[in-house]
Amino acid sequence: MMKCTFSAIAILLSIIVMTVLQSCDSPSKKKLPENFDYYAFKDSIKAEKLDTSGPGFETNIFENTLLTPDIDSANALLTRIDSAWHREMAMVEQVDSLRKIWKKMETHTPEELLLLKENTQILDSFLTSKKAPEGIPCSEAGCLIYAHIVKSTQTLYLYLDAVLIDSFAVSTGIGKYDTPTFNVRAAGPTFKRYTSKKFPGGNYEGLGNMPYVVFIKGGYAVHGTTTGNFEKLGTKASHGCVRLHPMNAKIFYELVSLIGLSNTWISITES
């Protein structure tokens, strides 16, 4: 009776694993939203009026002890972390329960131990190799969003699905703050409202001195600048980041928010 029960459990596990493997579709390159028109999207962003009267605009989010950045990507990140944590806990509880059941069983026969080892190997292989990716990892112009910043011309060239769709005047770093070259997928995070702690001062419509920021890597980012720096756009003037006119930064920020950081590549070159 013991052998039949164990064999039934092993067979059931095998069926579950095979079903999951068959149901996982092959990852495919992410596509733009259906009927997406960049120019219509751009016009809608320009026409949108900024409302700073709601919660989250009174203070910088990093000075908020409650850390509730409802309008920022950090909220989605924290939600994903919380969901993943709960999934992990549920899985651990299931595994612990199964182990308790097995410990109460009689000693397994050699055949049962072999079958258990085979099923464990199948499960381990599945869990380590299948991470349910959103799509095939992209790079450079192969990503849906490819931003190429050329320091010699102080211009950001924006490619959408490998097509040059727009360009914006920028300000990269000057002197000892020269912006380094990059050729990476944007690491994030992104924020509508952000104030630099290292280089404070200035504000743009309640959004801090780095509005609509998309972090590239580390402390380097693409972001909007304040009114006093508008006339410097097109020349080197920043402390290392890539400055944009706030409206252009908003367009870029909203586009990245729509398409996703995983499909955004940023390249910074001298020429």
Image (spheres, rainbow, N blue to C red):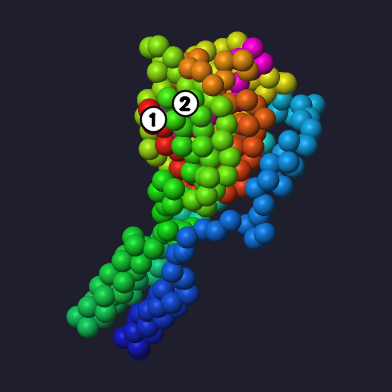
Locate residue 170, reporting x and y percent: 54, 25
> Mark 2 and 1 residues: CB-CB less than 8 Å, in contact?
yes
Residue shown at the point (40%, 18%) measured from the top left: 178
The range drawn in magenta is 215-229
Q: Is residue 173 visible?
A: yes
Residue shown at the point (51%, 29%) measured from the top left: 155
Locate residue 17, reporting x and y percent: 40, 74
Residue 271: image tag: 1
The residue carrying pointer 2 sits among few (fewer than 14), some (14 to 19) or many (20 or more) residues within 10 Å by Cα, namely some
Pick whichever, 32 or 90, lies toward us: 32
Would residue 234 be found to the left or right of residue 220 on screen?
Answer: right
Residue 211: image tag: none
Residue 153: image tag: 2
Locate residue 48, reporting x and y percent: 77, 36
Amino acid found under the numbered disc labelled 2: Thr
| Measured Cα–Cα span from mark 2 to mark 1 | 7 Å
In magenta stretch: residue 216: yes
Please identify the quarter of the rendering in which residue 53 is found. Answer: top right
Would residue 245 be found to the left or right of residue 102 on screen?
Answer: right
